[in-house]
Amino acid sequence: MYLIPIPAFSDNYLWLLHDGKRALVVDPGDAEPVLRALAQNSLQLESILVTHHHADHTGGIAALREACGAKVHGPATERIPQPFSPLRGGDTAHVLGLDFQIIDVPGHTAGHIAYYTSNMNGKPLLFCGDTLFSGGCGRLFEGTPAQMLASLDKLAALPASTVVCCAHEYTLSNLRFALAVEPGNADLATYQSRCERLRKDGLPTLPTSIAQELLINPFLRTRQPTIMAAARRFDASAHDDNTVFAAIRQWKNQS
Ligand SMILES: [Zn+2]
């Protein structure tokens, strides 16, 4: 199987997974770059996986369905272009010979889902939309900090080797914030240098892995004493898991 991040808009990635003949695409906000990639690689688009309803994740669905007859899978409780096969946490979607487990990850939107498969080329694979980014997490448009923390906890509990496909190239700005929260984190400084080199060469910093994010992502590290102390410097009332997470998220919004 081949995994390709197709750049779209200013900082989206539309993830394409294919076996040389058949393909799936995740969150096609735009049809044009997907159709180009399909033509370049002589691929048939079989399925479209959707994580949440935002236009930069759904804008290309209708045109791709029209052009390729692809079957659409999406979150049961969100409004995305009909018809689609509705999925909820605990469901399994069989796509391209893979079984994707559906994980409910509310927070960025109320019905946001993630797609996880335990073996793609020997490694687990996650499509997490706008829930988890490298060095960051999605903004809380429709959910509470407690919901987002619970969602991120589910993703953090996946195998460390999980290949994590995020929907935006936000890594460098996330890492600048992460270093403000945790200036003494040596893994963070190393990772920032690596990501800066990649971007300088015009390459994506993604996919990332759960192991990498556990080392550097402040939103997966809110129970670390350094992060709890930093949260309290921003908001003295931060005192438990949810309020520490909320303080870090609020700090990021203002940074
Ligand atoms: Zn979004």
Image (cartoon, rainbow, N blue to C red):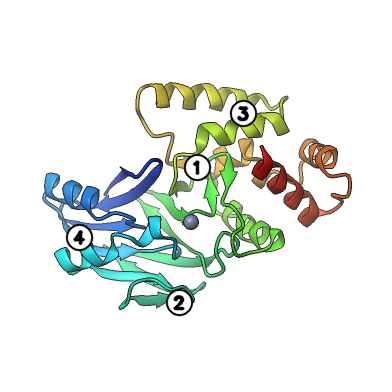
Residue at image point 15% right, 53% down? 43
Q: Position of residue 224 (x, y in %)?
A: 76, 41
In the rendered structure, the answer to whether residue 203 lies left or right of residue 141 reads left
Q: Quadrant of residue 80?
A: bottom left
Circle 2 sits in a helix, a strand or a loop, which is it? loop
Residue labelled with disc 3: 188
| Nearer-N-terminus badge (2/3) | 2
Using the numbered discs, state the Cα–Cα distance from disc 1 to disc 2 in whole angstroms: 27 Å
| Nearer-N-terminus badge (1/2) | 2
Mark 2 within 8 Å of ligand 1, using the beta carbon: no
Residue labelled with disc 1: 209
Q: Position of residue 195 (x, y in %)?
A: 48, 27
Task: Give the amino acid type for the residue marked by disc 2 in the picture.
Answer: Ala
Q: Position of residue 153 (x, y in %)?
A: 64, 56
Task: Give the amino acid type for the residue marked by disc 1 in the picture.
Answer: Ser
Q: Quadrant of residue 117?
A: bottom left
Using the numbered discs, state the Cα–Cα distance from disc 4 to disc 2 in whole angstroms: 22 Å
Number of numbered markers = 4
CB within 8 Å, label 2 to label 3: no
Task: Give the amino acid type for the residue marked by disc 3 in the picture.
Answer: Leu
CB within 8 Å, label 4 to label 1: no
Q: Nearer the viewer, residue 115 or 52?
A: 52
In the rendered structure, the answer to whether residue 228 lies left or right of residue 21 reads right
In the rendered structure, the answer to whether residue 219 lies left or right of residue 195 reads right
Using the numbered discs, state the Cα–Cα distance from disc 2 to disc 3 in whole angstroms: 37 Å
Q: Nearer the viewer, mark 2 or mark 3?
A: 2
* Quadrant showing the C terminus: top right
Q: Nearer the viewer, mark 1 or mark 3?
A: 3
Circle 3 sits in a helix, a strand or a loop, which is it? helix
Residue labelled with disc 2: 76
Residue labelled with disc 4: 45
